Amino acid sequence: MEVDDEIIKPKENEEDIRKPIVVILVGAPGSGKSTFCDHVMRVSTRPWVRVCQDTIGNGKAGTKAQCLAISSTSLKDGKSILIDRCNLDKEQRADFIKLKESHQVDVHAVVLDLPAKLCISRSVKRTGHEGNLQGGKAAAVVNRMLQKKELPKLNEGLTRITFCQNENDVQEAINTYGALSSSDVLPSGIFGEKKTDTKVQLGIMKFLKRVDAPSKVPSDKAIPEPSNETTNENHHINECQEKSGTCTLDGVPTLAFPSISTADFQFNIEKASEVIVETVEEFVNKIGNGRLVLVDISHGSKILSLVKSKATIKNIDSTKFFTFVGDITKLRSGGGLHCNVIANAANWRLKPGGGGVNAAIYDAAGPDLDIATKKRAGSLTPGKAITVPLPSTSPLFSKQGVTHVIHVLGPNMNPKRPNCLKDDYNIGCKVLREAYSSLFENFASIVRTQEKSSDYEFSNCDQKVRREDSASVNEKNKKFKGSIEVSESNNLCSVDGKQNATSSGKAGGSLNKDWGSWAQALHKIAMHPEKHKNDVIEILDDVVVLNDIYPKAQKHLLVVARAKGLDRLADVSQEHLPILKTMHDVGVKWARTFLKENQSLVFRLGYHSAPSMRQLHLHVISQDFDSKHLKNKKHWNSFNSPFFRDSVDVIQEISEEGKPTLNDDEKFMSMELRCNRCRSAHPNIPRLKSHITICKSPFPANLLQNDRLLQNAPDKDANTC
């Protein structure tokens, strides 16, 4: 896709208006509406409210009137809203479009007009859908809805319509809305509509940006805009801000890297820009779904300008590589760019200090980075790079979402620094090329081994779909029940990644099942841990230990079995008792280690009844649940309901009965939110988290028995809430 570099900004005397917007999602079940909402809300700095009829009634299906009521309330509170309903005809959209006049807001439509085959496939394969629209009955419902589809038009009262015909279009729309801060305004018109008689013109999307927002840093990333006939002409030039937001589980792992050797090592910027672009061109298609971002803190950066120009000439995919202006240690908080990996222009001793990027990264990461680096290497030679997993206790991890730092050392042309090449650019360019190659190879390794490996989080997998007319859907459900047979082994997408292996409360028994490629990460690490040394923290004969990439508490480890054919708890039998006891003992050892560091922690060890990742793994998780990654009811209930099986109980059941009990009914995921100590109920995750931080009640009696909890001492003097 060709894009234009033109960016627009408001007039200097233009009033800074912060008004919410209404975004109406239009699409059949399985088109990805809820996934769209989830991704936008996850990365955007603008306050959003998702309005979903399937869950509007305290987690259960509600009415259109309830959706309108919560929409109105949210708009009054200054929050933008995402209408997560099918909205496939004009009548269904009409009442939501009326919010435009009653609240003086813009109303947009995002049309997820994906192929019917894809929508049906997603709907049929999923389990645990909020509206119970899944399995064979889903195919008939999707077909019926698509036959009555009525695409939106501007004359309905809409301000802007974005059409998405494929998953790339959808991702582009997610990036667009995810990039909106509270002061941003999108141009009106029709975007992405297929035209058979005219050529679609692509350019750059125009944002009305705040000029005085110091926390927003500009990027050179280009975003599509509509044809000229729908472009607002009353704009001025400005830089565009890239804020699409990427965590590994969003399917877009991102490496942010500075220009190597051009600062303190005084490498020629023109030559350096050529090496960067040539190496990026070589590796951009070798990093899977990852992307590369060249970062510089200066708005007038010459290296960014040169690289951008050369990359354009070589037609390098701007969604896979772009430049960004900002502090590499504050990309998420300061610029809205989510990068899970950052590169450090290190010194040969791999020591903190020295100024520049090296000093900034060590300062931002705290002592954890220095300690972790020393465990990996004591020095670095020019042209080489080394990956250091960042401990979750590091501020760079907890505040910026950085999981790895890659130290890289380039050539030196500064006579005041060691190993000066004295302007020998034949050797210098070769070493610099080796440095970038090593850097990108390290990043590619991270992408391969950690791609979408977090329990209970995914990307590129439609997890939920809507139910608008519940009576009609239920009637069709009865009519078409069992009309299409779906193999259990094909259920690769499900709410929170969970696939039910057995019915609730049923003794474990393995069913044949295929695992999606994203769910294979733990299996690959367990089978070949020597290839994944950047990810594991302990390798033993029977188990490997690693940090959960998206921990749900201050401390959250996974102890993974290395035995073949042991994919999940349902596969366990009496012959596996030794490995289960080993996993438990290793988990206890790590919990005791953490307790020595922080005596206030309390640990619980257990298994998910129906895990999302292949290869049996034991969770070792602290009970504070203080984590930004714990975001919804399913996250909470997966660790605080019968769905979570304590390790000691599993071992006892297998010893006595030969099989563990699996509590994998979806009802456990929708249980009300209750404090894990005092069992008080709370309406949402923020309220629950706030309560947990002050709750001093003792844990429930059942958890205090049989060593289900590991702590330094019983909380005898605890006060109730």
Image (cartoon, rainbow, N blue to C red):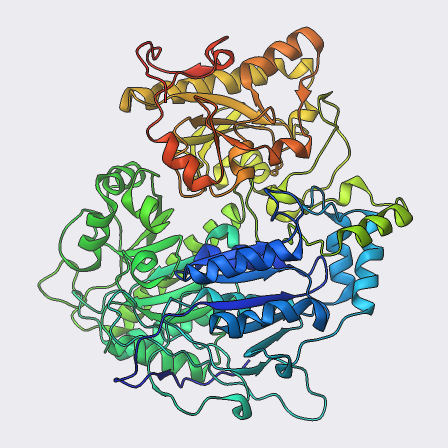
Residue 267, percent from left and from top: 21, 71
Residue at image point 77% right, 41% down: 489
* Residue 82 screen position, x and y as percent: 54, 61
Image quadrant holding the N terminus, namely bottom right
Comparing 698 with 40, the one in front is 698
Q: Residue at x 53, y 73 (%)?
A: 100
Give the position of the C terminus as an image quadrant: top left
Is there any visible trace of residue 360 in the rendered image? yes
Q: Residue 318 in the image: x percent, y percent?
A: 47, 74
Q: Is residue 246 visible?
A: no
Depth order, front residue of 226/543: 226
Numbered circles on residues, count: 0
Residue depicted at 72% across the width and 32% down the height = 501
Q: Quadrant of residue 69?
A: bottom right
> From the viewer's perspective, is 204 left or right of 402?
right
Q: Nearer the viewer, residue 225 or 512?
A: 225
Q: Is residue 53 above or below residue 508?
A: below
Residue at the farthest front position? 102
Q: Nearer the viewer, residue 229 or 683?
A: 683
Q: Residue at x 58, y 13 (%)?
A: 649
Residue 63: x and y in percent read: 67, 53
| In this rendering, position of residue 300 left or right of residue 514 | left
Residue 525 in the image: above or below residue 314: above
